[in-house]
Amino acid sequence: PEVVNGRTHKATVVDLSPWVEYEFRVLASNSAGIGEPSRPSAPLKTKAAVPVVAPTNISGGGGSRSELVITWEPVPEELQNGEGFGYVVMFRPLGSTTWTKAAVASVEASKYVYRNESITPLSPFEVKVGVYNNEGEGTLSSIAIVYSGEDEPQIAPVGTAALSVSAAEVEVSWQPIAWNRHTGRVLGYEVR
């Protein structure tokens, strides 16, 4: 705070963070300089408030068939603004008008998995994640697009051929499976 008049014996400290413990010291000054600081006051915690910082790095994807995996960067403790802190996860299929909402009542949480057999593989969802505490709901993140889990490949590779290279080696080749809107990209093949 600004320097306080010598006849004043109290000051209001502003712009403190909610639900944070502070200690205060006072220093006296005159034309000769600044004296030693007082001993720290007893710790004092500011009152709680609705959280105002939304989670960042909203992302996700992967998971199993019929799953929507949503991830985020957790909010640090000093920005949680009160007890009972948790996350509000909202999502809807791209193009839909109705949001599904879930609460994640864990301070350390950074992931939410929604399971539903009606989710089609690799479907795009609009996702936003917000925060809450005992004082109420706070800010929501901006919308991110997250895809539901992929399905296993439904077709086998074609054009399989084997060529003897030596007495102990055979080279096996095949035509790759093309990317499919419903099953996604092939990450690997198993040769039997």
Image (cartoon, rainbow, N blue to C red):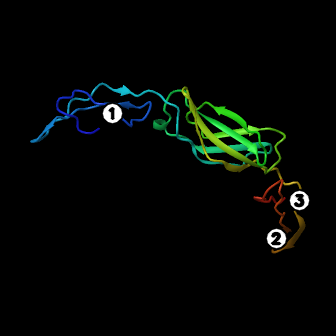
Q: Residue furthest left?
A: 32
- The mark nearer the N terminus, 2 or 1, is 1
**Image side of residue 6 versus residue 160, left or right:** left
Name the residue: 39% across, 37% down.
Answer: 15
**Secondary structure under badge 1?**
loop
The answer to whether residue 48 is above or below residue 173 is above
Name the residue: 39% across, 35% down.
Answer: 16
Q: Which mark is residue 156?
A: 3
**In the rendering, at what x and y percent does residue 110 appear?**
60, 40
**Quadrant location of the C terminus in the rendered image:** bottom right
**Image side of residue 173 versus residue 108, left or right:** right
Name the residue: 40% across, 28% down.
Answer: 46
The answer to whether residue 12 is above or below residue 169 is above
Q: Which residue is mark 2?
A: 171
**Image side of residue 54 versus residue 4, left or right:** right
The residue type indicated by label 1 comes to Val
What is the quadrant of residue 13 in the picture? Answer: top left
The residue type indicated by label 3 comes to Ala
Count of numbered marks? 3
**Secondary structure under badge 3?**
loop
Depth check: 49 or 5 in front?
Answer: 5
What is the quadrant of residue 90 in the picture? Answer: top right
Q: Are marks 2 and 1 in contact (CB under 8 Å)?
A: no
The residue type indicated by label 2 comes to Glu
Q: Which residue is mark 1?
A: 13
